[in-house]
Image: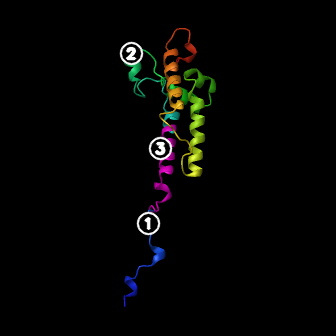
Amino acid sequence: MTHPEHEQRADLQPEVGSLPHRPWWRSPRTLLAAGVAAGTAYVYLVDPSQSGRYLPCPFLTLTGAYCPGCGGLRSMHALLHGDLAESLARHPFVAPGLLLAAVLLVLWWVRGRPRLRVNSSGWGMRLALAFLAAFWVLRNLPGWDWLSPV
């Protein structure tokens, strides 16, 4: 006969393959949301237009040409301050990209798992890379100043 203190109750045993419960504040979704909130607050408070506040773009420093991300922080800063026209002038794809990222983040938060599947060998990835390369080249050509971060 076994002692009652040494008996293991089946209802207290974790299921095979189940993950241990984490407190809400240690879940990956909460940590990601906190990181996004902290980064957004920093970009809102610290103006990237003032020199010395952020590191310079290495590609721009080395080549003198704009990379696909140049102007992104200034665009986001303007957008966070409610100036959509200035945001689009600095980088035309930051506002739509942030809107898409916000929608995907909210869906992930609510549903608990990402719904977007990326197939790196498919035509979608090739199309995205071709679009990125075309944007990179066009924003550095004369006459395409509307794509350059002014």
Q: Amino acid at mark 2?
A: Thr
Q: CA distance from mark 3 to mark 2?
A: 32 Å
The spot of residue 116 in percent (x, y) is 55, 41
Residue furthest top as drawn: 142
Residue 97 quadrant: top right
Residue 16 got which mark? 1
Q: CA distance from mark 1 to mark 2?
A: 56 Å
Q: Secondary structure at mark 3?
A: helix
Residue 59 quadrant: top left
Tag 2 residue: 63
Q: Amino acid at mark 1?
A: Val
- Chain part drawn in magenta: 18-40
Instruction: Verify whether residue 136 appears in magenta.
Output: no
Mark 1 or mark 3: name the one nearer the start of the chain: 1
Q: Main secondary structure of the magenta part?
A: helix
Instruction: Verify whether residue 31 appears in magenta.
Output: yes
Q: For the point 50% across and 33% down, which residue is it?
A: 43
* Disc 3 to disc 2: CB gap under 8 Å: no
Q: For the point 55% across and 17% down, which residue is it?
A: 147
Residue 35 got which mark? 3
Is 56 drawn above or below residue 141 in the view shown? Answer: below
Q: Secondary structure at mark 1?
A: loop
Is 41 drawn above or below residue 141 in the view shown? Answer: below
Q: Nearer the viewer, residue 68 or 115?
A: 115
Mark 1 or mark 2: name the one nearer the start of the chain: 1
Which label sits in the foreground, 1 or 2? 1
The quarter of the rendered structure image containing the N terminus is: bottom left
